[in-house]
Image: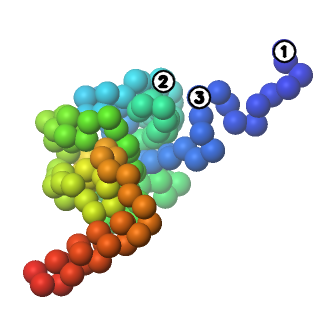
Amino acid sequence: MSATVSPIPPGYHTLTPHIFVSDAKKAAEFYRKAFGAEVRGIAQAPDGKVIHAEVKIGDSILMFNDEVPQAGVLAPTTTKANTCVTLHMYVQDADKTFASAVAAGAKVIMPLQDQFWGDRYGSLEDPFGHRWSIATHIKDQTPEEMKAAMDEAMASMATKS
């Protein structure tokens, strides 16, 4: 055994999302179809409930597990509450990823479009109640250019309301 152990395991980042879903096996399959996720592992309790699952999407790991109602671990689809978190994903081709997610069963929240901050961006809700934003960076801007683009976008929104 090595005398030096990394405090962050190989392949993980400082921040790793861990979410609760109503059906972790179905979620793993959805994330595979929607986002090209690699299923890294699914650990089950003797009753068949998933106590820990991991997928790798791009260079990041997403952890998730089935609900544990007796511990207050509930998915957004069970609580019927809007989730207060969005899982943001930068990808090579936002249009392709967005279309794959919709085809796999995601619901469009905000259609994909070019945004003033320089991303092609849209948002979805997965079948388990979690929000995802999908983006491809398409334009580098100076802070001044971004401020001008934001001011223009906000003025345009104000005239539409």
Q: What element carries label 1?
A: loop
- For marks 1 and 2, the one nearer the N-term is 1
Residue type pointed to by label 2: Gly
Q: Quick check: 96 left or right of 80?
A: left
Colouring chosen for the image of the structure: rainbow
Q: What element carries label 3?
A: loop
Front one among 141 and 94: 141
Residue at label 2? 41
Q: How far apart are marks 2 and 3 (CA)?
A: 14 Å
| 55 relative to 66, above or below | above
| 68 relative to 1, above or below | below
Residue at label 1? 1
Q: Residues within 10 Å of mark 2 (few under 14, many from 20)?
A: few
Residue type pointed to by label 1: Met
Q: In which quarter of the image is the N terminus?
A: top right
Residue 109 in sight from this viewpoint: no
- For marks 2 and 3, the one nearer the N-term is 3
Residue 35 in sight from this viewpoint: yes
Residue at label 3? 11
Q: Residue at x 47, y 54 (%)?
A: 73
Q: Residue at x 41, y 32 (%)?
A: 57
Mark 2 or 3: the one toward you: 3
Q: How many marks?
A: 3
Mark 1 or 2: the one toward you: 1
Callouts 1 and 2 close, C-beta under 8 Å: no
Callouts 3 and 1 close, C-beta under 8 Å: no
Front one among 67 and 144: 144
